[in-house]
Image (tube, grey):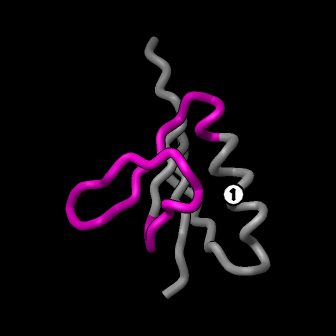
Amino acid sequence: MTKVLKIMDRTGHTVVPITDATRAEAEATFKRVLAEGGTAFKMDGPTGTPIKKFSEVGEETILMPQLVGG
């Protein structure tokens, strides 16, 4: 099964499959979201495990940008 990043945003989410062709772009997106204060969760059942490294990405990983209150 192809690994995927699900990037949450105001409109819902974007799914980025991680393949040989998209790996560099997916890794750059992962690092950018975390550098901007976001969080990544590897989904391993009904709950997720927070991760900090792209090498820890699972079959499904959710990226959540930093939440801003208002």
For the view shown, which residue lies furthest in the left direction? 46
The residue under the point 44% across, 49% down is 51
| For residue 53, above or below residue 38 | below
| For residue 61, above or below residue 65 | below
Image position, residue 17 (x, y; %): 61, 73
Image position, residue 31 (x, y; %): 66, 45
Q: Does the magenta run of residues contain 58?
A: yes
**Position of residue 27 in the picture relative to residue 3 (left or right):** right
Q: Amino acid at mark 1?
A: Glu
The residue under the point 64% across, 30% down is 36
For the view shown, which residue lies furthest in the bottom direction? 1
The residue under the point 51% across, 49% down is 63
Q: How many marks?
A: 1
| For residue 19, above or below residue 9 | below
Assign a secondary structure to mark 1.
helix
Segment colored magenta = 33-60
**Dot 1 corresponds to which residue?**
27
**Position of residue 16 in the picture relative to residue 69 (left or right):** right
- The quarter holding residue 22 reads bottom right
| For residue 39, above or below residue 8 | above
The residue under the point 74% across, 80% down is 20
Image position, residue 50 (x, y; %): 38, 46
Quadrant location of the C terminus? top left
